[in-house]
């Protein structure tokens, strides 16, 4: 039935009215957001919560902010607040409220550096913890004073590195992981599924990492608490401590409640007797634009975040926790930055244990092309290993912290063999094949000697013809030396610098300074940090676009999975996160992956 002319006009006019109402509402939201920006009181204390998962970067949702929806704090945002507060004359001091931040030792070191930089302003920095573990206390020691409440505790008990193995569970299920790995001593990623205990190489590496971290940890405590390292080691051996005991040991400056810590600020900042300390929380201070303080202006430098396990496709959040670095997303961001003549340099922030060899190479190639047009500098976060190192190796300069985990130059391939699982369930299957190697990915059969030989040939080709030559070229070393540093061996940033795998110590700000230098930009002037890919416009966030339909569906599916797995224990989620990556191998995808998920408590 044909639509009448009057109905068409009504629909058109109605559509225009609805569109105008939406635009008007968005305008009102933005106006409310602008008018609602907080004012910073004079001589205020900035309260910075160092807590939560603290992903490397989370784009701010301006519409969500305007609607009053709380924004997740990221690690890069934390660093930005410190940069702003350092030059903001209205901020008189800094309160670090430390409560189990979800960061590793690389970022903990970077945060301490940022706090030390803030202290150059001469403004007092106090740290407050209700309970302090190793990492929390390590961060706190960067402050001028450290406080616990009277009932608080300090668990500086030393380091424990845990390695988990799932072969026993797989054996019970009748599942066998068949793998090929280059560097069998050090490329231990499959060991979680093929062994029940650490091998010689994994034990050697973990002990070397622990030694490095132990030295940094005890050295930091000795320096900031005015003790010698031997005394610090003895204090740690007798931990944990109550707040009173920690004060007696000289580890903290007072057993005070939070309100009493503000009283300390009142004295330090010269408040009048009886005046209440004026504070502003980081959640509010984030709304103060950097450029209003003379920061984040000038020439444009692109900052691209590659945070999480590496996969093909678009970047996303894993249903089992953490982020996924999608090659499509990073390649497009690198290409856009390279082709934008207003962008003078590119800083790639890598915080990844690796993943897909294919996706890693696609990103490597984009960086290689971009480097021909402008400088590319890599900033490594907690970890930039295996595939994370692969995408870094051809940068003009690589910057990492001494406690960053990097290297792991190696590759493995494999598949799960589920014959025993099928038998247990009473399932039978039969393959009908055409072609000598047509059954190479059969999930119920192990490789034949001929099939295994072909897969070994593929694996060797990826390592010796791709990974090693690219490391050798990017780091200006011969293939023999690259191989001696490879074979899956994991290095700390300090060890990597000694071996020529990185260039400088430092964090994201150091990388930006080096990018400025390579781009011949004035060292004494700031640059505008342009994060790519740029946050999506409001309508795209709400309704998406045609090209985003598949991504939107994937995100919805991931959210559904996420809701299901949240009830799982954290360690189980880690296992499934690795299994999610391993599952890709049954289609022949090789993996550049960190040998183990290193968690040091």
Image (spheres, rainbow, N blue to C red):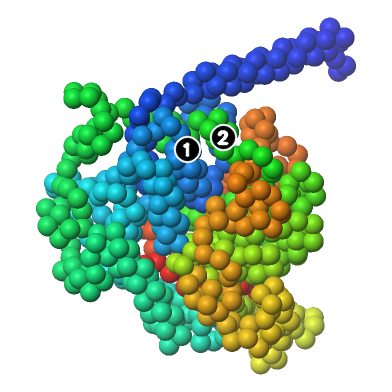
Q: Earlier in the sequence, mark 1 or mark 2?
A: 1
Residue 585 in the image: above or below residue 184: above
**Point 59% across, 81% down: residue:** 486
Q: Secondary structure at mark 1?
A: helix
Q: Residues within 10 Å of mark 2 (few under 14, many from 20)?
A: some
**Image quadrant of residue 123?**
top left
Where, quadrant-wise, is the C terminus in this rendering? bottom left
Instruction: Please tell me which residue lies in front, 212 or 6.
Output: 212
Residue 582 in the image: above or below residue 317: below
- Give the left or right position of residue 101, taking residue 331 as reference: left
**Point 69% across, 77% down: residue:** 476
Q: Residue 152 at x, y = what percent?
A: 18, 50
Q: Secondary structure at mark 2?
A: loop
Is there CB contact under 8 Å for labels 1 and 2? yes
Instruction: Please tell me which residue lies in front, 19 or 109.
Output: 109
Q: Which residue is mark 1?
A: 87
- Give the left or right position of residue 572, taking residue 426 as reference: left
**Point 57% across, 63% down: residue:** 399
Instruction: Please tell me which residue lies in front, 532 or 419.
Output: 532
Total numbered circles: 2
Q: Which residue is mark 2?
A: 294
Q: Residue furthest top?
A: 6
Residue 224 in the image: above or below residue 592: above
Q: Is any atom of residue 378 visible in this view?
A: yes
Marker disc for residue 105: none
- Give the left or right position of residue 255, taking residue 126 as reference: left
**Point 71% across, 54% down: residue:** 519
């Amino acid at each position: 039935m044909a639509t009448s002319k009057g109905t068409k006009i009504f629909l058109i006019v109605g559509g225009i009215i609805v569109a105008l109402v939406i635009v008007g509402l968005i305008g009102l939201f933005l106006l409310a957001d602008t008018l609602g920006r907080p004012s910073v009181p004079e001589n205020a204390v900035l309260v910075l919560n160092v807590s939560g998962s603290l992903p490397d970067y989370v784009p701010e949702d301006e519409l969500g902010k305007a609607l009053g929806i709380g924004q997740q704090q990221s690690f890069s945002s934390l660093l930005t607040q410190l940069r702003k507060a350092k030059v903001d004359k209205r901020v008189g001091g800094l309160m670090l409220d430390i409560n189990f931040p979800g960061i590793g030792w690389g970022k903990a070191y970077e945060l301490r550096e940022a706090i030390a930089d803030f202290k150059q302003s001469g403004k007092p920095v106090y740290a407050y913890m209700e309970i302090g573990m190793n990492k929390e206390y390590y961060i706190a020691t960067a402050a001028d004073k450290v406080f616990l409440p009277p009932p608080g505790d300090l668990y500086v008990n030393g380091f424990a590195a845990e390695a988990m193995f799932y072969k026993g569970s797989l054996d019970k299920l009748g599942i066998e992981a068949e793998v090929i790995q280059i560097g069998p001593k050090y490329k231990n990623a499959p060991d979680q599924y093929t062994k029940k205990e650490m091998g010689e190489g994994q034990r050697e590496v973990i002990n070397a990492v622990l030694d490095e971290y132990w030295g940094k940890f005890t050295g930091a405590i000795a320096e900031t608490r005015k003790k010698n390292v031997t005394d610090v080691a003895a204090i740690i051996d007798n931990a944990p401590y109550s707040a009173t005991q920690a004060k007696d040991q000289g580890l903290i400056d007072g057993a005070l409640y939070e309100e009493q810590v503000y009283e300390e600020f009142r004295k330090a900042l010269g408040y009048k007797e009886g005046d209440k300390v004026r504070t502003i929380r980081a959640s509010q201070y984030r709304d103060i634009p950097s450029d209003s303080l003379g920061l984040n202006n000038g020439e444009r430098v692109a900052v691209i975040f590659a945070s999480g396990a590496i996969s093909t496709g678009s970047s996303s959040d894993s249903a089992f926790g953490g982020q996924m670095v999608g090659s499509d997303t990073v390649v497009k961001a690198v290409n856009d930055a390279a082709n934008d003549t207003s962008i003078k340099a590119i800083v790639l922030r890598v915080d990844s244990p690796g993943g897909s060899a294919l996706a890693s190479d696609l990103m490597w190639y984009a960086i290689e092309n971009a480097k021909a047009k402008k400088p590319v500098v890599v900033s490594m976060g907690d970890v930039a290993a295996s595939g994370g190192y692969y995408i870094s190796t051809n940068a003009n300069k690589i910057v990492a912290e001494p406690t960053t985990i990097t290297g792991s130059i190696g590759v493995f391939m494999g598949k799960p063999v589920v014959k025993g699982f099928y038998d247990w369930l009473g399932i039978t299957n039969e393959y009908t094949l055409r072609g000598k190697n047509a059954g190479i990915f059969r999930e119920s059969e192990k490789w034949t000697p001929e099939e295994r030989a072909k897969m070994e040939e593929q694996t060797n080709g990826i390592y010796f013809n791709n990974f090693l030559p690219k490391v050798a070229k990017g780091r200006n070393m011969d293939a023999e030396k690259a191989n001696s540093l490879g074979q899956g061996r994991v290095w700390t940033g300090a060890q990597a610098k000694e071996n020529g795998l990185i260039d400088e110590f430092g964090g994201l700000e150091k990388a930006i300074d080096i990018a400025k230098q390579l781009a011949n930009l004035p060292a004494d002037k700031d640059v505008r940090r342009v994060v790519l890919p740029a946050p999506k416009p409001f309508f795209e966030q709400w309704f998406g676009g045609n090209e985003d339909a598949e991504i939107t569906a994937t995100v919805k599916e991931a959210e559904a999975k996420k809701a299901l797995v949240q009830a799982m224990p954290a360690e189980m989620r880690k296992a499934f996160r690795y299994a999610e990556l391993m599952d890709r191998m049954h289609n022949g995808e090789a993996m550049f992956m960190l040998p183990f998920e290193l968690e040091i408590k």
